[in-house]
Image (tube, helix red, strand yellow):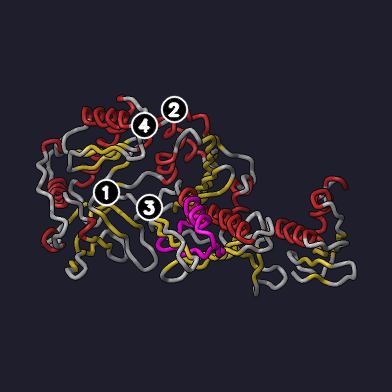
Amino acid sequence: MNKELIINAAPQGVEIALLEDKKLVELHSEKSDARFAVGDLYLGKVKKLIPGLNAAFVDVGFEKDAFLHYTDLSPYARSLLKFTNMCMNDKSESGLDFSKFTIEPEIIKTGKINEVLSGKPNILVQILKEPIAAKGPRLSCEISLPGRFVVLTPFNDIVAVSRKIHSSEERKRLQKIVEAIKSKNFGVIVRTAAEGKNTAELHEDLSALVEMWKTIQQNLKGSVAPTRILSEQTKTNSILRDLLNEDFNRIVVNDRTIYSDTKNYIQRIAPEKSDIVSFYQNGSPIFDSFGITKQVKSSFGKTVNLDSGAYLIIEHTEALHVIDVNSGYKSVSNNQEQNALETNLEAAEEIARQLRLRDLGGIIVVDFIDMKLAENKRKLMEKMEEFMNPDRAKHAVLPISKFGLMQITRQRMKPEVNINTQEVCPSCNGTGKISSTLLLEDEIEKNLGYLITHKHRNLKLVVHPIMFAYLTKGWPWNTKMAKWKKKYGQKTLLEKDSNYHLTEYKFFNQHDEEIKM
């Protein structure tokens, strides 16, 4: 699999597109004044305790108080409170020596929030979920600092190794190395990316995180809540930190500063991959040049078309997301069960992509095409899990119910990506809407293929003059119409009509009767 990162810098912020085998799978945006991103650390002030919810509302500077539940307090909440207070009141030049910090006893799992946060203290918190709709951020006191190979967790001495590293010898080796190099009062989680890495690489990564913790201590000194203590690194760097592997073959950036920062970051974490970063200066918009704009337009509407002619309908309700799978005119064979399976498998792959692309969270209900055989239902379930595997968000896939519905839950970390894919109609001065002009050519070709497949002959296509010019430009043997003739083995008469608006087109049969699509 080839992965590419295309970065588009604009005055309002940065857009980042992740492509896998040229297909858009993730789209991230980072505003220039971004705050309250997942991973950011804040010094917050407990404002209100809610014993009924066993939770607290904390002021971190957002317009609405952030939510902190007891289960997100961390077993080391008392140590964190003590640490926060000591750092805020620290007057020494050298700062607090964390290795000599005395860890407080752990809180019990079934305790009460007012037993821990009585007195409404100041507390160091980490953003767990970004503000969504009318809700403020969700917080956690389980502080974790992620690096390339390890994750640093203060206030404990536990060393854990990722379960995705299956070799018991490798797990023991990594655990032994980390136990030897880590400092007191720091726990370490060894990430999957650490597999095969030597002591020097792990030590460098761990040392950088320890320095980050010292920065946190320094920033807490004399701080007044609410205030941001440490910001998560840029979205670009965090994506590279989590995803960079041998599959990455290109990173393209259209901004000199981001290009330089990305190059330096890659140089630091993976010097052998530094040559994959390139600066884009071709003049045309970077997303247009790499076909991302077109993919965005075709992927974010209510209807998502699949290559075979099948399509998805994606709708959002207050409680959940609903996805309906429709076969369209797809017909692989005369076997209905086989057709349903083929369409469902194709749809499952696209659904997994759509969940990542739109960042849909919560409950997702998928209405697949009905299948009778239990074996086919099981096969679809296994494939769905396989397609969801690359998704970094926590998720669970349930088997298809007796009603033919599949339920998926996916971790909600930030607001879903919602892009309006419609354009103002040029013929009605904005009173109506049309599908994106970028997709018009594909739409005409799809409908032409459908008509020819269904035995229509001597077809005539009527379009707007501008579309006519586009379809006939080039040498006679190299126009779009010529290519369609070669592809479908049938010539189609093309005519223009200035009364048509830009995206309007119609098909007519040999009797000059309009064919309704």
Instruction: Please give the name of the residue rendered at 85% of the width and 54% of the height, measured from the top-left corner.
Output: 490
Q: For the residue marked with disc 2, what is the amino acid?
A: Pro
Identify whether 266 is placed above or below 77: above
In screen coordinates, is 451 left or right of 115? right
Badge 2 vs badge 4, beta-carbon distance below 8 Å? no
Q: For the residue marked with disc 4, what is the amino acid?
A: Glu
Q: Which mark is residue 394?
A: 3
Q: Which mark is residue 195?
A: 4
Q: Residues within 10 Å of mark 4 (few under 14, many from 20)?
A: some
Q: For the residue marked with disc 1, what is the amino acid?
A: Ile
Q: 276 and 160: which one is in front?
A: 160
Q: 401 and 210: which one is in front?
A: 401
Residue where numbered disc 2 is placed: 271
Q: For the residue marked with disc 3, what is the amino acid?
A: Lys
Q: CA distance from mark 3 to mark 1?
A: 27 Å
Question: The C terminus lies in which quarter of the figure?
Answer: bottom right
Q: CA distance from mark 3 to mark 2?
A: 30 Å
Residue where numbered disc 1 is placed: 229
Residue segment shown in magenta: 357-383
